[in-house]
Image (tube, rainbow, N blue to C red):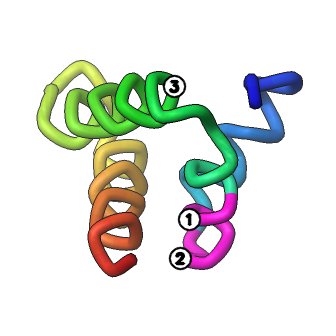
Amino acid sequence: MSIDDPEVFWADALSADPERVRTAVNALSPKERESVIAHLRSMATRDDWTPAQRANAWAALVALSET
């Protein structure tokens, strides 16, 4: 699968709903999933993202680790 609509994908991937996060990311190919997780790690740790974006990225990583 590919990310057909990036806005919808990222709204789901950065959602407060862990199931929405997992569904969005797990629908990707392994290579895409790896890239998204790397991007989420970057978002969660870099200061050039807003605190809310960092928190959402961290929550997404937590949701993905619960699978």
Q: Quadrant of residue 26?
A: bottom right
Between discs 2 and 3, the one toward the N terminus: 2
Q: Are marks 1 and 2 in contact (CB under 8 Å)?
A: yes
Could you say whether the residue bearing mark 2 is in a helix, strand or loop? helix
Camera-side mark, 2 or 3: 3
- Circle number at residue 32: 3
Main secondary-structure element of the magenta-colored stretch: helix
Crowding near the residue tagged with mark 2, few <14, some 14–19, many ≥20 C-alpha atoms within 10 Å: many
Residue 39 point in image, percent of width and height: 34, 27
Amino acid type indicated by mark 2: Pro
- Please state which amino acid type lies under the numbered disc 1: Arg
Provide the residue designation for mark 1: 22
Please give left or right for residue 66 compared with residue 1 in the image. Answer: left
Q: Secondary structure at mark 1?
A: helix
Residue identified by numbered label 2: 18
- Return the x and y of residue 59 as percentages of the image width and height: 35, 66
* Mark positioned earlier in the residue sequence (1 or 3): 1
Rendered position, 63 above or below 38: below
Marks 1,3: beta carbons within 8 A: no
Residue 53 position by quadrant = top left
| Residue in the foreground of this view, choosing between 61 and 48 | 61
Q: Position of residue 55 (x, y in %)?
A: 32, 57
How far apart are the two marked residues, 2 and 3, measured between alpha carbons? 19 Å
Residue 46, percent across and down? 15, 27
Rendered-image quadrant of the N terminus: top right
> Which residue, as the protein is rendered here, is positioned at the far front?
30
The residue under label 3 is which amino acid type? Answer: Glu
Q: CA distance from mark 1 to mark 3?
A: 14 Å
The residue drawn where x is 31% and y is 58% is 61
Q: Check if residue 66 falls in the magenta segment.
A: no
